[in-house]
Image (cartoon, helix red, strand yellow):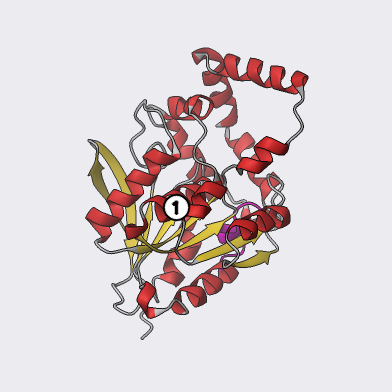
């Protein structure tokens, strides 16, 4: 039975002595699993505002700010897929209280994949929206370019220094730069609103935000997607914004199919964040896919 969506409720949960912000909407549905929405790098629960209201008429919906982002704490830690995997797994276990369908965009997709593959007791299924993460064979087969590798090492060594990293962060967090970046990864420019820019800008003002940004250059590379897919035994839905300038969605989708041929996928006229750019399409595809999950999977 469909219910009327209520305003989501925000709250904090303590994890490893750090405050983690999350949002909850909708009521538990015995016949359907809860949904856990996971944002990408630099974003937050706010990025799901166009999805939560509609999805919560069908599901119990949760969205969480990964440690280091949004309204969650920003300690000076080493950030990695393993860290966020454990955060999400413990959140599902301690707060949601039953396995969920995890839906993640970009970095959030990679983190969700780490959960579903390596903590399967927390996952009923997985939805990836333009997911981040490397494949092993692409690393091995790419032709080495000594000059490019040397330049990359030099840039990395410079950005590992506190001052250059801080200055780059101060540049990247300007509202005008945030807007230009968003406009470059959204096909529909009207979706890049002042509200969206502000939602990404605001957490950058928090203490510790600059060090979280710097951790991108320090963190070890996580487990590769092909290894994770070989560990995965849960239903998988891929939703691709095929206008994403940061990744070739079609060839990347083919790589996912190579390692997990039983997946379901759809390509949408959108950029890197299809859930925010074409939310009606994403909500409908996600809803119908979860409805179709076999009862034994729930």
Q: Mark yes or no: residue 112 visible.
A: yes
Foreground residue among 295 and 46: 295
Would residue 104 appear left or right of 8 to someone viewing this image?
Answer: right
Mark 1 burial class by Cα count in 10 Å: few <14, some 14-19, many 20+: many
Quarter of the image for residue 97 reads: bottom left
Q: Is residue 73 above or below residue 276?
A: above
Residue 225, x across and y down, in percent = 55, 47
Q: Residue at x 67, y 59 (%)?
A: 270
Q: Is residue 114 above or below residue 222?
A: below
Q: Quadrant of the N terminus?
A: bottom left
Q: Residue at x 33, y 58 (%)?
A: 122
Q: Which residues are magenta?
A: 271-279
Mark 1 = which residue? Answer: 112
Residue 31, x across and y down, in percent = 33, 80
Quarter of the image for residue 242 reads: bottom right
SS of the residue under disc 1: helix
């Amino acid at each position: 039975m469909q219910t009327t969506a209520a305003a989501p409720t925000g709250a904090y949960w303590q994890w490893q002595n750090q405050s983690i912000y999350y949002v909850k909407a909708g009521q538990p549905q015995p016949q359907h699993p809860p949904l856990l929405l996971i944002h990408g790098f630099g974003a937050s629960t706010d990025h799901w505002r166009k999805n939560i209201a509609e999805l919560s008429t069908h599901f119990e919906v949760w969205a969480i700010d990964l440690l280091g982002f949004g309204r969650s704490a920003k300690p000076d830690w080493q950030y990695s897929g393993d860290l966020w995997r454990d955060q999400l797994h413990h959140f599902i276990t301690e707060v949601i209280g039953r396995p969920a369908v995890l839906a993640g965009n970009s970095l959030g997709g990679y983190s969700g994949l780490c959960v579903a593959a390596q903590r399967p007791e927390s996952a009923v299924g997985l939805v990836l929206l333009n997911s981040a993460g490397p494949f092993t064979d692409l690393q091995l087969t790419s032709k080495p370019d000594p000059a490019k590798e040397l330049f990359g090492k030099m840039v990395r060594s410079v950005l590992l220094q506190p001052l250059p990293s801080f200055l780059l962060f101060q540049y990247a967090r300007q509202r005008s730069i945030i807007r230009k970046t968003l406009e470059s990864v959204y096909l529909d420019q009207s979706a890049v609103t002042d509200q969206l820019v502000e939602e990404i800008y605001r957490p950058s003002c928090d203490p510790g935000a600059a060090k979280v940004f710097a951790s991108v250059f320090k963190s070890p590379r996580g487990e590769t997607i092909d290894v994770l897919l070989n560990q995965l035994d849960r239903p998988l839905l891929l939703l691709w914004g095929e206008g994403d300038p940061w990744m070739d969605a079609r060839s990347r989708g083919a790589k996912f199919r190579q390692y997990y041929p039983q997946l379901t996928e759809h390509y949408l006229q959108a950029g890197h964040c299809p859930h925010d750019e074409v939310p009606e399409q994403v909500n409908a595809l996600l809803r119908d896919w979860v409805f179709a999950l076999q009862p034994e999977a729930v």
